[in-house]
Image (tube, helix red, strand yellow):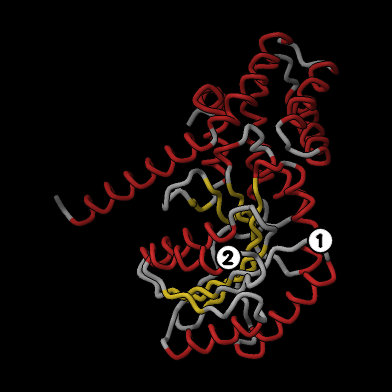
Amino acid sequence: MSFFKKLKESISNKTAEVTSKFKDGLSKTRDSFVDKVEELILRKKKIDEEFYEDLEEILIGADVGVNTVLELIEELRKEVKQKKIEDANDLKPILSEKITELLEGENNNSLNIQSGRLNIILFVGVNGVGKTTTIGKLAHKLKSEGKQVLLAAGDTFRAGAIEQLEVWGERVGVEVVKHQAGADPAAVIYDAIQSAKSKNTEVLICDTAGRLHNKVNLMNELNKIFRVIQKEIPDAPHEVLLVLDATTGQNALQQAKLFKETSDVTGIVLTKLDGTAKGGIVVAIRNEMNIPVKFVGLGEKMDDLQEFDANQFVNAIFGQGFLEEETEANPS
C-alpha cells in the first residue's frame, strides 16, 4: 500500500471515529429534540402559525435559547415565503442548514497555537464544570500531537484542586508547576512561565480558581494574572478558554456572560454534552455570545474531548433522516 493511500485511509478512519463520538455523545439530545420535531412534522404536515409556535417551544425546550430561537424562526419564515414551501417535511434540511450557519459564525474554532513561541492557554470557569479534567484531556491531546506541555496549578483555593491537577499530570506524563494551597495564583503562573521558558515548552496550560460568589474578587484575581502573563509574554494569553457544563442549560449561558465581562474569553469548552438532552445550549452560547465553541466533552475517556465541528454536531443530532432529505433537496 502506498504512503498516500495509507494516509488517506488513516484520515478516513479518524473521521469515522470522530463522527461516531459525536453521534454517541449527542444521542440524548438527538432522541429528545429530533423525535419531537419529527412528531410535529407528522402531526401538522402543513406549515402554519401553530406549526411555528410548536417548533419554537421544542427549540426552547432543547435550550437553544429564546433570542436564538426567535432569530431562527424568523429565518425559517423567510425561507418558507421565498421558496413557497408548504409541506412541513421540506423544512427539515433548511432547519439543519440554519442551525449549522448559526454555529459556524465568523470566528475561528481552531486553537491559537503557533510554532516558535510559548503558547499560553488560560482556563476559566466555575467549580464543578469539569475544568481541571478538561485541562488534563487537552494536555493529553496536545502531547499526543507531539507538543511539549506544562501545567500550572493556578487554582489554589479549591480544596483538592492542586492534587487533582497533579493526578492528571501523572496520567498524561506532563509536569505540573504548583505552590501550596492558598498561595497567590499569579505567583504560581509567573513561576510556570519561567519554567516553560527555561525548558523551551511549546504550550503552558494554566488553571484558575472558579469562585463566583464575589465577582469583584474574581475580576481582581484574573486581572492580576493577566498583568503577570503580559509582562512576561506581551501578546499572551493566546487563548482564554471558558469551561461550561452543558447539563446546566441556561445557567451556562449566564456564566458565559459573566466571564465575558471579567476576562477576554476567546473560546468555549462545553463539557458533559453526553449527559444532557439539551445540547441546543451550544447553539445559544455560540450565537448570543459570539464566542466560538472550540471543544466539546462527549464522554469520560481521555480522548473524549473533541474539537468542535458544526457540521458533525448538526449531523449527529439530526441523523440520517434529515441528511437524506437534504441530499434529495440538494442533489449533486
In the image shown, does 141 or 157 lie closer to the viewer? Answer: 157
- For the point 49% across and 52% down, the residue is 305
Q: Is residue 102 left or right of residue 307?
A: right
Q: Is residue 82 left or right of residue 145?
A: right
Identify whether 166 is placed above or below 84: below
Q: Is residue 242 left or right of residue 7?
A: right
Query: Residue 161: which disc?
Result: 2
Mark 2 or mark 1, earlier in chain: 2
| Count of all numbered marks drawn on residues in the image | 2
Identify whether 258 is placed above or below 194: above
Q: What is the three-letter code of the residue carrying label 1?
A: His
Q: Could you tell me which secondary element the residue under label 2 belongs to? A: helix
- For the point 45% across and 78% down, the residue is 202
Quarter of image, res 110: bottom right
Q: What is the three-letter code of the residue carrying label 2?
A: Ala
Rate crowding at label 2 as few (under 14), some (14 to 19) or many (20 or more) other CA atoms within 10 Å: many
In the image shown, does 132 or 262 lie closer to the viewer? Answer: 132
Residue at the disc numbered 1: 213
Quarter of image, res 107: bottom right
Q: Could you tell me which secondary element the residue under label 1 belongs to? A: loop
Percent x, y for residue 126?
A: 70, 58
- For the point 66% across and 44% down, the residue is 282
- For the point 71% across and 10% down, the residue is 45
Distance, label 2 to label 1, CA atoms, is 18 Å
